[in-house]
Image (tube, rainbow, N blue to C red):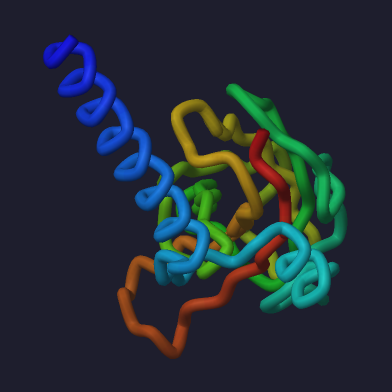
Protein backbone atom coordinates (compact mmCIF):
# COMPACT_ATOMS: atom_id res chain seq x y z
CA UNK A 1 0.00 0.00 0.00
CA UNK A 2 2.82 2.37 0.85
CA UNK A 3 4.50 1.80 -2.56
CA UNK A 4 1.35 2.70 -4.47
CA UNK A 5 1.05 6.01 -2.57
CA UNK A 6 4.67 6.88 -3.40
CA UNK A 7 4.14 6.00 -7.08
CA UNK A 8 0.94 8.08 -7.14
CA UNK A 9 2.75 11.06 -5.60
CA UNK A 10 5.60 10.77 -8.11
CA UNK A 11 3.14 10.63 -11.02
CA UNK A 12 1.29 13.69 -9.72
CA UNK A 13 4.55 15.62 -9.37
CA UNK A 14 5.57 14.73 -12.94
CA UNK A 15 2.13 15.73 -14.26
CA UNK A 16 2.29 19.08 -12.44
CA UNK A 17 5.81 19.74 -13.78
CA UNK A 18 4.79 18.97 -17.37
CA UNK A 19 1.63 21.09 -17.13
CA UNK A 20 3.62 23.91 -15.52
CA UNK A 21 6.22 23.75 -18.31
CA UNK A 22 3.55 24.09 -21.03
CA UNK A 23 1.87 26.94 -19.18
CA UNK A 24 5.26 28.67 -18.95
CA UNK A 25 5.88 28.24 -22.70
CA UNK A 26 2.41 29.55 -23.50
CA UNK A 27 2.99 32.73 -21.49
CA UNK A 28 6.59 33.42 -22.58
CA UNK A 29 7.18 33.97 -26.27
CA UNK A 30 10.67 33.24 -27.46
CA UNK A 31 12.10 36.40 -29.06
CA UNK A 32 12.81 36.09 -32.77
CA UNK A 33 13.80 38.32 -35.63
CA UNK A 34 11.90 36.22 -38.17
CA UNK A 35 9.15 37.85 -40.17
CA UNK A 36 5.87 35.95 -40.31
CA UNK A 37 4.19 35.10 -43.60
CA UNK A 38 1.39 37.65 -42.99
CA UNK A 39 3.88 40.40 -42.17
CA UNK A 40 5.88 39.51 -45.30
CA UNK A 41 2.82 39.68 -47.54
CA UNK A 42 1.73 42.99 -46.01
CA UNK A 43 5.18 44.60 -46.13
CA UNK A 44 6.61 43.16 -49.35
CA UNK A 45 3.87 42.40 -51.88
CA UNK A 46 5.97 43.50 -54.85
CA UNK A 47 9.40 43.40 -56.44
CA UNK A 48 11.98 45.54 -54.59
CA UNK A 49 15.31 47.15 -55.43
CA UNK A 50 16.01 48.21 -59.00
CA UNK A 51 12.64 46.80 -60.09
CA UNK A 52 12.53 48.97 -63.23
CA UNK A 53 15.51 46.95 -64.52
CA UNK A 54 13.43 43.76 -64.51
CA UNK A 55 11.89 43.14 -67.92
CA UNK A 56 10.59 39.62 -67.23
CA UNK A 57 11.04 36.72 -64.81
CA UNK A 58 9.60 33.21 -64.90
CA UNK A 59 8.62 33.17 -61.21
CA UNK A 60 5.86 35.59 -60.23
CA UNK A 61 6.25 37.70 -57.07
CA UNK A 62 4.71 35.84 -54.11
CA UNK A 63 4.89 32.43 -55.83
CA UNK A 64 5.50 29.21 -53.90
CA UNK A 65 8.85 27.63 -54.74
CA UNK A 66 10.58 24.38 -53.80
CA UNK A 67 13.30 21.99 -54.88
CA UNK A 68 15.53 22.66 -57.85
CA UNK A 69 13.93 25.06 -60.32
CA UNK A 70 15.06 26.18 -63.75
CA UNK A 71 14.28 29.86 -64.20
CA UNK A 72 14.71 32.46 -66.91
CA UNK A 73 14.42 36.18 -67.04
CA UNK A 74 15.37 39.37 -68.79
CA UNK A 75 17.00 42.43 -67.23
CA UNK A 76 18.29 45.70 -68.62
CA UNK A 77 20.98 48.20 -67.56
CA UNK A 78 24.17 46.10 -67.58
CA UNK A 79 23.91 43.37 -64.91
CA UNK A 80 26.33 40.96 -66.64
CA UNK A 81 30.06 40.44 -66.65
CA UNK A 82 31.50 37.83 -68.99
CA UNK A 83 27.95 36.60 -69.53
CA UNK A 84 27.32 35.91 -65.84
CA UNK A 85 24.77 37.34 -63.43
CA UNK A 86 24.29 36.54 -59.73
CA UNK A 87 21.04 34.84 -58.70
CA UNK A 88 20.88 34.38 -54.91
CA UNK A 89 18.29 33.32 -52.35
CA UNK A 90 17.77 35.62 -49.35
CA UNK A 91 15.63 35.11 -46.26
CA UNK A 92 12.77 37.47 -45.36
CA UNK A 93 15.26 39.71 -43.54
CA UNK A 94 17.44 39.88 -46.70
CA UNK A 95 20.21 37.69 -45.27
CA UNK A 96 22.00 35.51 -47.83
CA UNK A 97 20.86 31.87 -47.74
CA UNK A 98 22.29 30.50 -50.97
CA UNK A 99 24.47 31.90 -53.74
CA UNK A 100 24.05 31.11 -57.40
CA UNK A 101 24.51 32.47 -60.86
CA UNK A 102 22.82 32.70 -64.21
CA UNK A 103 24.13 32.77 -67.73
CA UNK A 104 23.19 35.18 -70.51
CA UNK A 105 21.24 33.59 -73.36
CA UNK A 106 21.43 36.71 -75.55
CA UNK A 107 24.19 39.26 -76.19
CA UNK A 108 25.21 40.48 -72.74
CA UNK A 109 27.47 43.37 -73.83
CA UNK A 110 24.66 45.91 -73.85
CA UNK A 111 22.73 48.10 -71.44
CA UNK A 112 19.57 46.98 -73.23
CA UNK A 113 17.53 43.91 -72.29
CA UNK A 114 19.53 40.69 -71.82
CA UNK A 115 17.88 37.31 -71.28
CA UNK A 116 19.37 34.74 -68.92
CA UNK A 117 18.77 31.31 -67.46
CA UNK A 118 19.68 29.85 -64.09
CA UNK A 119 18.97 26.95 -61.75
CA UNK A 120 17.93 27.76 -58.19
CA UNK A 121 17.94 25.05 -55.54
CA UNK A 122 15.59 25.74 -52.64
CA UNK A 123 16.22 22.30 -51.10
CA UNK A 124 17.23 22.33 -47.45
CA UNK A 125 16.14 25.94 -46.89
CA UNK A 126 13.69 26.95 -44.18
CA UNK A 127 10.05 27.07 -45.21
CA UNK A 128 8.55 30.54 -45.42
CA UNK A 129 9.04 33.94 -47.00
CA UNK A 130 12.23 34.64 -48.95
CA UNK A 131 13.57 36.60 -51.90
CA UNK A 132 15.21 35.67 -55.15
CA UNK A 133 17.91 38.29 -55.65
CA UNK A 134 19.06 39.11 -59.15
CA UNK A 135 22.34 40.92 -58.53
CA UNK A 136 24.70 42.45 -61.03
CA UNK A 137 28.07 40.72 -61.38
CA UNK A 138 30.25 43.53 -60.06
CA UNK A 139 33.92 42.67 -60.72
CA UNK A 140 35.08 46.01 -59.29
CA UNK A 141 33.75 45.07 -55.84
CA UNK A 142 32.83 48.72 -55.29
CA UNK A 143 29.53 49.06 -53.40
CA UNK A 144 28.48 52.07 -55.47
CA UNK A 145 28.40 49.78 -58.53
CA UNK A 146 26.10 47.21 -56.85
CA UNK A 147 22.51 46.90 -57.95
CA UNK A 148 19.93 44.21 -57.38
CA UNK A 149 16.33 43.20 -57.88
CA UNK A 150 14.45 41.34 -55.10
CA UNK A 151 11.56 39.09 -56.05
CA UNK A 152 9.49 37.91 -53.04
CA UNK A 153 8.71 34.17 -52.95
CA UNK A 154 7.53 31.63 -50.40
CA UNK A 155 9.66 28.53 -49.92
CA UNK A 156 7.62 25.35 -49.39
| Number of numbered tags placed on the structure image | 0
Q: Is residue 130 left or right of residue 16?
A: right
Q: Is residue 148 left or right of residue 15?
A: right
What residue is shown at x 24% (from left), y 30% (from top)?
A: 9
The answer, for residue 112, to whether it is visible in the render is no
Position of the C terminus, as image quadrant, is top right
Give whichever of 136, 130 is nearer the camera: 130
What residue is shown at x 82% (from left), y 44% (from top)?
A: 63
What residue is shown at x 45% (from left), y 29% (from top)?
A: 124
Q: 153 above or below 14? A: below
The answer, for residue 50, to whether it is visible in the render is yes
Give whichever of 85, 15 is nearer the camera: 15
Where is residue 99 shown, x and y percent of the image?
41, 47
Where is residue 49 shown, x and y percent of the image?
67, 77
Q: Is residue 36 left or right of residue 54?
A: left
What residue is shown at x 22% (from left), y 21% (from top)?
A: 5
Q: 59 above or below 20? A: above
Where is residue 147 shown, x and y percent of the image?
56, 76
Position of the N terminus, as image quadrant, is top left
Give whichever of 107, 6 is nearer the camera: 6
Please identify the residue farthest to the front as the structure is shown. 1
Where is residue 93 shown, x and y percent of the image?
52, 69
Amino acid sequence: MKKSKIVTIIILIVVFLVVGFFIYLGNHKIPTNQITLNEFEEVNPEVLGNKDDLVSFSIAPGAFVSGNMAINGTVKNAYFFEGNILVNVLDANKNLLKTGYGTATTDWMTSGPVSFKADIDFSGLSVGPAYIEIHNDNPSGLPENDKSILIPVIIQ
